[in-house]
Amino acid sequence: MPRVISGDAEIAYQTLGSGSPIVLLHPFPANHEFWLPIAERLATHHQLILPDLRGHGDSEIGEGPATMDKHAADVAKVCDDAGVGRGIFAGVSIGGYTLFEFWRKFRERVSALILCNTKAQADTAEARAARLKSAEDVLKGGPEQFIESMIPKLIGATTRETRPDLVERARNMMKKMSAEDISQVQQGMAVRADSVATLKTINVPTLVVAGDEDGLTPVADAELMRQNLAKCELRVLNHAGHYGVFEQHKAAATVMQEFLGSLRIGKA
């Protein structure tokens, strides 16, 4: 995997395919492999850039909380290194949080957005306190305990019941994060800015994808984004949790391909 220095961390990424570029940002606590089932289909017409976000996969965490500002700067560095001047950006969960910050800083580089299983609101005071406590607890209890506690929240009930192979693949991705990685990423998410007002500034075509079994970012959060985005299409995946585009990758790929096919965007 190519690597690029961004601030105080080395960021790893993978590229696949050729054509107009799409940057795919995975959720916490996964890595770029999250996108591989979909990438096989998208790579036939697009150049795909799949970073491991700071602290995930093979990317270093750096010093201090992994803030959205750092993640956005990392993505810009990856794009520079991969030769992407302007492209389509897709993000799941923390990938979406990163894209809101990326839009605020680098909107000229964005031709379209795909926001999956994410939300524009910042953490509530209660959610922030719980996230910061989790960031402390993982340093004491270790990553294994944290990962097992997260799987029921991240993976939909249908997938957990019918696709143990996908659950195990997700678990293996998560295991690449250390306790320190998890803690500093959690701290960064806890202090992220509210992005509801940012939605009204987004003037590029946007696809919002939700999962009907997602308890972390439910369909109501996706609907809030749809109501505030100027050029938005909302699609809901059935039998899909927070990792919906991984769990239902065939349906997700179809939805994304339909959206991409509707765009009139030239190569960057």
Image (cartoon, rainbow, N blue to C red):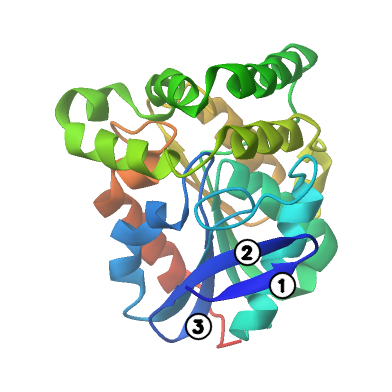
- When the figure is inspected, residue 104 is found, relative to residue 96, above or below; the finding is below
User: Sequence-wise, which precedes: disc 2 or disc 3?
Assistant: 2
Q: Residue at x 52, y 57 (%)?
A: 58
Q: Which mark is residue 11?
A: 2
Q: Is residue 142 visible?
A: yes
Of circles 1 and 3, the one toward us is 1
- Give the x, y percent position of residue 77: 71, 72
Are the residues flagged by discs 2 and 3 in contact, CB closer than 8 Å? Answer: no
- Give the x, y percent position of residue 242: 44, 33
- Give the x, y percent position of residue 32: 45, 57
Q: Which mark is residue 20?
A: 3
**For numbered disc 3, what is the local secondary structure?**
strand
Q: Which mark is residue 77?
A: 1
Are the residues flagged by discs 1 and 2 in contact, CB closer than 8 Å? Answer: yes
Q: Name the foreground residue: 153 vs 148.
A: 148
Q: Name the foreground residue: 35 vs 256.
A: 35
Counting other residues with Cα less than 10 Å from the Cα at mark 1, is it few (<14), some (14-19), or many (20 or more)?
some
Of circles 1 and 2, the one toward us is 2
Instruction: Say which amino acid is labelled 3.
Output: Ser
Picture quadrant where residue 28 is located:
top right
Quadrant housing the C terminus: bottom right
Estimate the spatial distance between the alpha carbons at disc 2 and disc 3, rounded to whole Å: 22 Å
Q: Residue at x 59, y 82 (%)?
A: 82
